[in-house]
Image (spheres, helix red, strand yellow):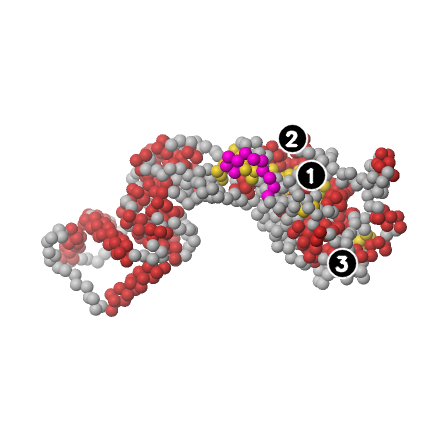
Amino acid sequence: MYDLADLKWLLTVWIRRVVVRTRFWLAGLPYRVRTWLRQLADLRRSGQLQLPRMSVQTRLWMWEFPHRVAAWFSRPPGKPRRRRIHFPIASPALNIVVVVCGALVVWAVKTFPPPDQVYPLKATLSPRVDRQLILHDDKGNIFARRGGCVDAPVRLEELPEHLIDAVLAMEDRRFYYHLGIDPKGILRAAFNNYQAARIVEGGSTITQQLAKVTYLTSEKTYERKIKEALIVLRLEALLSKDEILERYLSVAYFGEGCHGARAAARHYFNKPVGDLTLSESAFMVALLRAPSKLARRRDMAWQRHGLVLKAMAEDGRLDPDLIPAVQRAETVDRSGTLGAYYADWVAQGVDATADGKSTPLKVRTTFNPKLQRIAEKAVEDILKRSAKGRRASQVALVAMRTDGRVVAMVGGRNYRDSQFNRAFQALRQPGSSFKTFVYLAAMRAGAHPEMYASDSPITIGDWSPENYGRNYRGAVTLRRAFASSINTVAVRVSESVGRNRVIRAARDLGISTPLTPTPSIALGASEVTLLELTAAYAAIAANAYPVRPWGVAALGEDTRKGRPPAGSGEWRLLVGPIMRDLLATTVSSGTGQAARIPIRAYGKTGTSQEFRDAWFMGFAGNLVVGVWIGNDDNSPMRRVTGGSLPAQIWQRFMSNARRQDPQFQRQLPRVAAFQSKVRRDRIETHVASNDFLDQGYGITNFFALMTPRTQRRMRGYGRERRPGWTRRDRQYQRRGWRRRRGWGW
């Protein structure tokens, strides 16, 4: 709570400053009034202004009134006044004013805590920014910086005069003549904004901006405005005008993470703040209006650079004849975008305050610049050729190793145009790529890829799913239904196994977004992120779950190699070999044939309703890659399916990565860091009955529909002769050795 003595002292200091500045203002009042009367007379003589005639006495009174007022305020304190003003204490209006002011003071005392505790003056010397992160790639090279860019506070003596003049001309021309709040400036800004029919000028003073940047937020509430007014009065009472200006230039935001004039001079021009030229100072002051936007759009900042010079000339701080001779300065371009989306993702997950230090923190990541360039080139090559005609505007790509190590990330087509990271921030419908969890639940429940299901129309309540192309094939195996992405079979399997089992399978593999247990969940109606879906497919590749994506290998001077997060790969995926066989069939002879590469590849396509989202999720060797294509406004594309553009991008990236990545492994590796323990509660020995036997073939009567040969093949699944088997394979089979193609020995 406020101390009464502190409040009394604060009000006393403020009233004294008001009286002193009022006397200075009244001392110049005669000159101002005389000038105004002369202008009034000139307008009257020219006929532009018609005024009623005034008597000689009125004119003399108007001429002598300013001198009398100034003399009254300027009279020495020891000399008695000729006239004294007696306030009517018993006046009802004055009593009401006193009561209201007292109530406001009491409310402020009870509402706001002591200023020394909540608003310490030392806070105005340093900006409220996060600790700067210096991000290194997997080779130890710096590729990005995130967080605040700060430096030591500045002193007015070391700043060039034109920088101070530019700040005062643009931000607060009457800085040395008001008490922190400028009513005249507020009225002027309101009038100019009204004339322009938009906001072209702000009424905040430099002291108000310092209070907002240092202590407050940008929320637009009356409570914040009251707090700001109290803080401004306190700053004006405790600090001189030069100190306020110094602290403002030490914490002001200049864009691209830079706070303070010293740090901004180093960032944009690579020189000390005292060596800035007139053009460079005008550029930095131009950034103060909208630093985040103007720092990215340097052309707009240079246009505002001319307005700064013009304002300096209008305020008498610059000779107008010198403006044409001012040359545009060269800025240092530090806005490299290679791995920018990856850097944003890593930075939001790093706790920079854990060690209690404020110096820049070194972060060693798993980022691979070579794979990042391959990913960006694959995206640009495919979309440049086909995106415009297909009405596809955005793309996202995530590449990780089978242990969850993210090595490359594309969050959009252009980082400068949009910093929204669609790889981990966007929630989109996965479409048929979610069917992997449906079939995973079925395989856990005892189903087999060679079982038959009915591809025929089905109705659940008032919902009737349809296949792509509205074609129905009758009885098909689960392998063919998965590879061809048949919707009706996926819905039947989901309803037969149970939607809760499907959700549990997705949760086991790392999907954390809300999943609604509706019939349409089998077709990917619930939204997911690309990063989580890619990690789920990595679990199938690693034969262990869950796989948690990670990108930080070490912090500070730690030289140890990074390890997956705790709990990653804790459980073994018992039906992993069967799921990989289904995914391989999709690429070899299903909807993902556009993603075929010379080595064995696994994948699944996905397309949401009305072609709003297109996905391809897959892996080959030790690389797991997910691709998404769509529009930010969720508008439909022109027949873009997961097997078209996303599969082509995946194929282009994987083909180049296989040749250029020295860490690429052709075979699916076993992750040594994963424990892969057997989880007994995920082993199911029977399939739940269902109510769909009268509408088609349920899973419970698959064996009744099979031929004897198919039943024999099912009992010894994996022993049948398959295309590509050699004589030695058959010899191994006769000896009792089992080989499952693509699953190892």
Give the secondary structure at mark 2: loop
- Disc on res. 670: 1
Indicate the amino acid at tag 2. Answer: Pro
The answer to whether residue 570 of the structure is visible from this angle is: yes
- Residue 720: x %, y % from top left: 85, 42
Residue designated by label 3: 688
Q: Which residue is at a point 25% across and 54% down the rendered structure image?
A: 9
Q: Judge from the rendering whether residue 673 lies leftward or rightward of residue 297; answer left or right.
A: right
Indicate the amino acid at tag 3. Answer: Ala
CB-based contact (under 8 Å), mark 3 and mark 2? no
- Residue 655: x %, y % from top left: 68, 34
Label 1 or label 3, whichever lies nearer to me, is 1
Q: Which residue is at a point 33% across and 41% down the rendered structure image?
A: 246
Q: Which residue is at a point 31% across and 49% down the rendered structure image?
A: 235
Q: Which residue is at a point 15% across and 54% down the rendered structure image?
A: 72
Magenta segment main secondary structure: loop
Disc 1 from disc 2: Cα separation: 18 Å
Q: Split into 4 quadrants, where in the image is the N terminus?
A: bottom left
Q: Residues within 10 Å of mark 1 (few under 14, many from 20)?
A: some
- Residue 729: x %, y % from top left: 84, 36
Q: Judge from the rendering whether residue 335 lies leftward or rightward of residue 14; answer left or right.
A: right
Q: Judge from the rendering whether residue 628 lies leftward or rightward of residue 305; answer left or right.
A: right
Residue designated by label 2: 662
Look at the image and give the residue range highlighted in magenta: 555-565
In this orientation, which residue lies closer to the viewer: 418 or 583?
A: 583
Q: Earlier in the sequence, mark 3 or mark 2?
A: 2
